[in-house]
Amino acid sequence: MTRIHERIEAPVPIDAAFDFIADFGNADAWDPNTPQADRLDEGPVGPGSHFELQVRLGGRTAPMTYRITEFERPNRVVLAGEGSGVRSLDDIRFESTPGGTRVDYIADIWLGGFLRLVQPFLGSRFAAIGRDAAEGMTRELTQLGARLGDAAQRSDAPAAAPAPYPATAPADGSAV
């Protein structure tokens, strides 16, 4: 087994950080080693939600299916992944900080078949994958925080004065 452990902080509220990262359909936005990610079911993201990711492993891209096994919004999500010759367990924890959110990401990876024999020699490659994902996650969450901040500023602007008269005549036909 190989463990990837990354910790980041981003200026985004915990609920928004959790919702974005727990939806692994967004993984292609923040993980450069995931060129494609899709949600396989509908409805709110939660326990049992399924995702299919195309994941780069060495010189090839392979499909992996992930399922949410634990879901404690907004503090923790655990996803189990399986693909051709690889399994993973991703345990992602979120903590509110004065400046936003701290994300603690642990991925345990098991390689099967021939790859199992070379896994002990892939530590530096897995470490680079983790760093790349952490950098992408920080970038995307920072951008999300900026978009949310812009939206909040717009909602704090004074509302336009109400029109002095209703826009349409009353339904009972009386004069306005």
Image (spheres, helix red, strand yellow):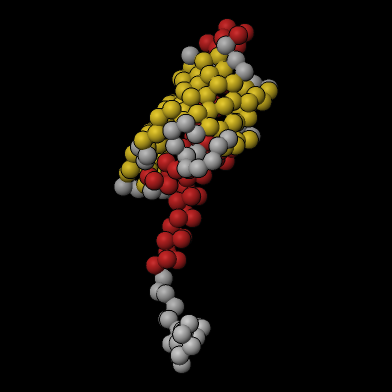
Point out residue 13 in the picture as x, y percentages from the top left corner.
Answer: 38, 48
Could you say which is closer to the camera, residue 94 or residue 125?
A: 94
Q: Can residue 105 be seen from the camera position used here?
A: no
Asked if 175 appears above or below 60 in the picture, the reply is: below
Between 161 and 163, which is closer to the camera in this rendering?
163
Residue at 45% from the left image edge and 90% from the top image edge: 174
* Quadrant in which residue 84 is drawn: top right
Quarter of the C terminus within the rendering: bottom left
Furthest toward the left, the residue is 98
Q: Residue at x 68, y 22 (%)?
A: 59
| Residue at x 64%, y 21% (from the top left corner) | 58
65 versus 16 height, above or below: above
Is 52 left or right of 93, judged from the image as shown? right
Q: Residue furthest bottom?
A: 175
Number of numbered labels in the structure image: 0
Looking at the picture, how far across and down is residue 114, in whole percent? 62, 8
List x then y, in percent, for residue 166: 46, 84
Query: Is residue 42 among what the camera can see?
Result: yes
Q: Residue at x 54, y 41 (%)?
A: 42
**Residue 71 position by quadrant:** top left
Q: Position of residue 101 (x, y in %)?
A: 37, 43
